[in-house]
């Protein structure tokens, strides 16, 4: 395998970014680590998240990765700068798309669904101060949503009810744009679209992430189709037809 793009998240969430990357960079190999052994990240302390993110990055470096995509808002917003200082590799991260949302909202109210870890981060608050001073940002912790995606039991009445309960307070405050500030949540977008009014726009920032990876990648002259390998730090697992190989960490 040639040098690859290394991707990690606490679980399957980061897979929501993979189609945009494969579309833009079809010749790149990918090594994906789902850190189920340390799942979920959203409730952990910043110190614990940093220590773990360094371990996973070291593992990806062992797998011959040339760039790391931190496919997790919780890690990006809390510790991506520290990761950049710790490893001489290009890092790309993902954070709630506040800037484009602030530019396109008509009601001036943007809803953000994210983890506790993202909401407590300095980067998230800096981004709001920088790009959202003229709009109202309403926040909701997506309690139970990462587990819902990992368990993947389909669109049950119960799941729709949870999504309804979480988004109703945001709608009450006038939100017309919803940011899915956790990479697990785009897998719930079809259900969210069912329960939200058509006027609410959900912003997909995966194409922007793929574009940023392309900008930072060293030149790749390969013309063969990129391969992808999936690992989990938990027990061997299969999710939506993808088999993850266990990686003891
Ligand atoms: N998917 C991650 C994120 O983007 C973290 C979910 C979790 O483990 O809490 O924030």
Image (cartoon, rainbow, N blue to C red):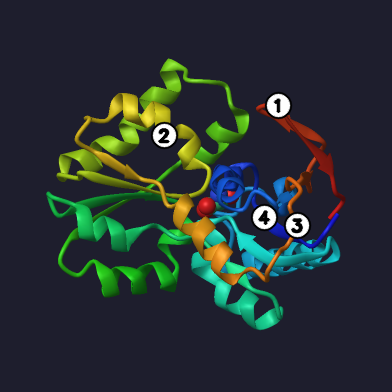
* Residue carrying label 3: 222
Please tell me which residue lies in front, 244 or 140. Answer: 244
Q: Give coordinates of residue 72: x percent, y percent.
A: 56, 56
In 3D space, how far apart are the residues under numbered discs 1 and 4 (Cα atoms)? 19 Å
Which residue in the rendered view is the most extreme toward the top? 157
In 3D space, how far apart are the residues under numbered discs 3 and 4 (Cα atoms)? 24 Å
In 3D space, how far apart are the residues under numbered discs 1 and 3 (Cα atoms)? 28 Å
From where the camera sits, is residue 156 visible?
Answer: yes
Q: Which quadrant of the figure contains the N terminus?
A: bottom right
* Label 3 Cα crowd, 10 Å radius (few <14 / some 14-19 / many 20+): few
Left or right position of 148 against 104: right
Does the closest atom of ligand 1 sit within 8 Å of the Cβ of label 4? Answer: no
Q: Determine the residue positioned at 35% across, 74% down.
A: 126
* Residue carrying label 2: 189
In 3D space, how far apart are the residues under numbered discs 2 and 3 (Cα atoms)? 34 Å
The quadrant holding residue 213 is bottom right
Please tell me which residue lies in front, 94 or 64. Answer: 64
Which disc is residue 241 wearing?
A: 1
- Of badges 2 and 3, the one in the foreground is 3
Q: Determine the residue positioned at 76% across, 45% down.
A: 227
Along the polypeptide, which appears first: circle 1 or circle 4?
Answer: 4
Along the polypeptide, which appears first: circle 2 or circle 4?
Answer: 4
Along the polypeptide, which appears first: circle 1 or circle 2?
Answer: 2
Numbered disc 4: secondary structure = strand
Left or right position of 166 against 181: left
């Amino acid at each position: 395998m040639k040098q690859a793009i290394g991707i990690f998240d606490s679980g399957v969430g980061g897979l929501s970014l993979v189609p945009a990357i494969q579309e833009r960079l079809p010749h790149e190999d990918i090594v994906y680590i789902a850190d189920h052994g340390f799942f979920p990240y959203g409730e952990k302390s910043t110190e614990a998240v940093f220590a773990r993110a360094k371990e996973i990055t070291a593992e990806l470096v062992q797998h011959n990765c040339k760039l790391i995509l931190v496919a997790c808002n919780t890690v990006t917003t809390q510790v991506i700068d520290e990761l950049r200082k710790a490893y001489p590799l290009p890092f790309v991260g993902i954070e709630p798309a506040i800037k484009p949302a602030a530019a396109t909202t008509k009601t001036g109210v943007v809803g953000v669904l994210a983890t506790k870890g993202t909401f407590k981060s300095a980067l998230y608050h800096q981004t709001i101060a920088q790009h959202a001073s003229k709009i109202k940002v309403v926040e909701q912790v997506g309690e139970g949503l990462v587990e819902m995606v990992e368990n993947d039991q389909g669109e049950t009445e119960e799941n729709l009810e949870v999504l309804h309960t979480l988004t109703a307070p945001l709608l009450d405050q006038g939100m017309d744009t919803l940011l899915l500030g956790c990479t697990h949540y785009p897998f719930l977008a079809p259900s969210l679209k069912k329960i939200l009014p058509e006027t609410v726009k959900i912003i997909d920032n995966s194409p922007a992430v793929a574009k940023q990876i392309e900008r930072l990648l060293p030149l790749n002259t390969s013309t063969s189709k990129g391969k992808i390998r999936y690992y989990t730090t938990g027990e061997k697992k299969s999710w939506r037809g993808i088999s993850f190989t266990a990686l003891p960490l």
